[in-house]
């Protein structure tokens, strides 16, 4: 048996509750959220149950497997689920403190953060983070509001019952672009994402029942992942069963987002 390349220090350890594993198994935590939470747990100060981190630093800690923006989203998810608490970081790039709920402190007590989420002035403390995905600027919230206002009209336009869509092919409008670029086709079924952004584009393409990744990758370069995810969420919140042409509907929502951005 080969020796480990490092020596385990039995005097340096932290208590990690099995309930975190249970939360993962039962679906209350996604694996990425679980990984970040455990990392915060291991790096927290045992005297106050607090870790000092930055989104860029966490991305480097995970060997850049997760982008800074993705780490941002995971941290907000953990805060929304009340595993951790931290002050709003909109517009800040420096490190910040993260309080970890129920962390076992060195004095034998536990870290409690429930009071952090109590309502203040009729609004919860973490409601600000719910306004936008990944601490997005205020104008992104305005884009989402405009998309919401135009959504119903687009649903009608691309629904089975819409007169404007009768007589038109049910194929996605995006396929026209794909057919004009057969030499660069990248089939969805065989596409292998190399980054988190491409992995998210593949997820959206499958939802839209696309056969080629060309449109999604082009949209990623043109609009960025944030707008794609906002449009994806907005579409999933629509009455999906009435949408006849998912790709065309998605493209219309994305175009509105682009014009508003």
Image: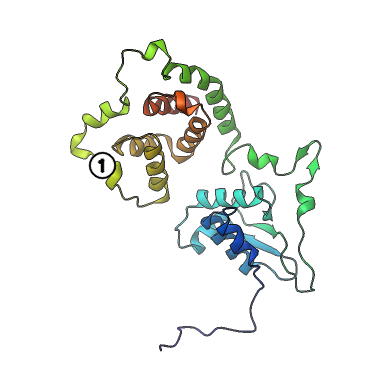
Please give the residue where the numbered disc 1 appears in the rendered image: 186
**Is 131 rendered above or below residue 45?**
above
> As displayed, is residue 7 above or below residue 169?
below
In terms of depth relative to the viewer, which is nearer, 83 or 196? 83
Percent position of residue 215, x then y: 32, 34
Which SS class for mark 1? Answer: loop
| Residue in the picture at 31% in, 39% down | 213
Residue at left 65%, top 50%? 81
Compared to residue 140, the image places residue 34 above or below, namely: below
Quarter of the view holding residue 159: top left
For disc 1, the neighbor class at 10 Å (few under 14, some 14 to 19, many from 20) is: some
**Towards the viewer: 238 or 4:** 238
Viewed as shown, does residue 141 lie left or right of 120? left
Residue at the outermost left position: 183
Quadrant containing the N terminus in the rendered view: bottom left
Q: Which residue is at 18% across, 38% downward?
A: 183
């Amino acid at each position: 048996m080969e020796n480990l390349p490092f020596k385990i220090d039995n005097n340096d350890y932290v208590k990690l509750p099995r309930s975190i594993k249970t939360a993962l198994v039962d679906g209350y935590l996604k694996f990425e959220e679980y990984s970040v939470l455990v990392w915060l747990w291991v790096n927290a100060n045992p005297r106050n149950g607090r870790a000092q981190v930055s989104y860029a630093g966490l991305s480097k800690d995970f060997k850049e497997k997760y982008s800074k923006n993705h780490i941002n989203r995971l941290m907000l998810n953990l805060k929304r689920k009340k595993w951790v608490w931290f002050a709003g970081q909109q517009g800040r790039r420096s490190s910040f403190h993260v309080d970890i709920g129920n962390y076992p402190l060195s004095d034998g007590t536990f870290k409690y953060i429930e009071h952090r989420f109590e309502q203040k002035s009729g609004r919860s403390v973490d409601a600000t983070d719910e306004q936008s995905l990944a601490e997005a600027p205020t104008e992104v919230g305005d884009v989402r509001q405009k998309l919401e206002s135009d959504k119903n009209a687009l649903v009608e336009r691309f629904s089975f019952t819409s007169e404007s869509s009768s007589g038109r092919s049910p194929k996605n409008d995006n396929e026209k672009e794909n057919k004009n670029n057969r030499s660069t086709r990248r089939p969805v079924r065989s596409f292998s994402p190399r980054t988190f952004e491409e992995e998210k584009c593949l997820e959206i393409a499958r939802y839209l029942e696309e056969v080629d990744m060309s449109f999604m990758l082009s949209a990623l370069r043109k609009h960025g992942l944030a707008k794609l995810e906002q449009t994806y969420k907005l579409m999933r919140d629509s009455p999906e069963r009435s949408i006849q042409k998912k790709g065309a509907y998605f493209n219309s929502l994305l175009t509105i987002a682009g014009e508003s951005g």
